[in-house]
Image (cartoon, helix red, strand yellow):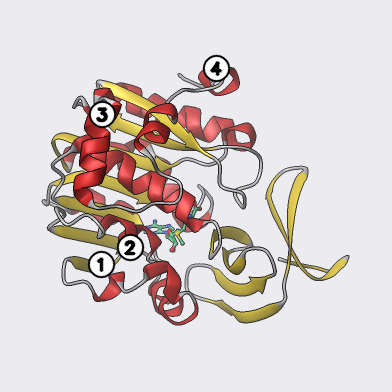
Amino acid sequence: MTDDTMPGWTVERLHNGWGQALEESEVLYDNETDHQRLRVFTNPRFGRVLTLDGVVQTTEADNFIYHEMLTHVPILAHGAARRVLIIGGGDGGMAREVLRHHGIAHVTMVEIDAGVVEFSKQYLPMLSAGAFGDPRLTLVIDDGAAFMKTTEDKFDVIIVDSTDPIGPGEVLFTDTFYGHAKRALTPGGILVTQNGVPFMQGDELTNTLRAFKALFSDWGCYLATVPTYAGGPMAFGWGTDGDGRSVDVDTLRQRYTAAGLETDYYTPAVHKGAFALPGYVERLMP
Ligand code: SAM
């Protein structure tokens, strides 16, 4: 939220005792929806910045890291994904990256806040880059937990691109939700989740992986560092009953080349390396 002590700057206070300040060159949008407070401002270093309830969600400059790693890792590991589910993802960046895979026949995106979608189309068009107009995309405005509970559809990859477990995102970090997600996976399907910065939010990762450990034969997390998700590398939860994690780097390279991808963070070697965890993250494993 804007900070009296730093006029013209927004200070994110997601973590106790730690803040992240971003200069606001220009505030483009600031409004409350039924679910959360939406703000977009421009910053000299990160370009356009989206915050929800005062927490950085994504920025023009560094969103590629997060969106590439939460899409290409499960999709290239799976090798034959055709149906993908995105929970959250209202800014459209996740859909953009998923839809770059020509083999993907259909993407369902379940976003609770229509305001995020509409306003992202207008103020952050570079994030969705036309994804909302792709005929393969079905946008559902609903609580992702309610959708997961009732859907009869099956998906090869499920991506949880939610806010943090505060406010509307809280229900997406529960054992119940994960159990419903597992039920909606096809054989060999992969569930991946936005799971915060373990140096700052270690208990959230441990809680998610405790549920994954009970649900999946292969569970764990992988890492990538996103500058505006402050506090060190971010963790992505990984759960599957398939063998996607064991795909070797040469096979990943073949799939990456065949997909015709040009990425700025993801590489097959980074994919494999991302699962190597430092000690302090290893110690968070349930
Ligand atoms: N990259 C961001 C991060 O790592 O925190 C997430 C970005 S995306 C904007 C997060 C989206 O999750 C928002 O559009 C928010 O409205 C949506 N969301 C939060 N809770 C939800 C729920 N229960 N069901 C569906 N979407 C939800």
Q: CA distance from mark 3 to mark 2?
A: 25 Å
Q: Amino acid at mark 1?
A: Val
Q: CA distance from mark 4 to mark 2?
A: 34 Å
Q: Amino acid at mark 4?
A: Arg
Secondary structure of residue under mark 1: strand
Q: Which one is earlier in the sequence, the residue at label 4 or at label 2?
A: 2
Q: Label 4: few (<14), some or many (≥20) within 10 Å?
A: few
Q: Which one is earlier in the sequence, the residue at label 3 or at label 4?
A: 3
Q: Which residue is mark 2?
A: 96
Q: Which residue is mark 1?
A: 140
Asked if labels 1 and 3 touch by Cβ distance under 8 angstroms, the answer is no
Residue at 20%, 59% (x, y): give it: 107
Q: CA distance from mark 4 to mark 1?
A: 38 Å
Q: Label 2: few (<14), some or many (≥20) within 10 Å?
A: many
Residue 181 visible in image: no
Q: Point out which mark residue 283 bears.
A: 4
Asked if labels 1 and 4 touch by Cβ distance under 8 angstroms, the answer is no
Which of the 4 quarters of the picture holds residue 113?
A: bottom left
Q: Which residue is mark 3?
A: 250
Badge nearest the viewer, 3 or 1: 3
> Residue 167, percent across and down?
52, 56
Asked if labels 2 and 4 touch by Cβ distance under 8 angstroms, the answer is no
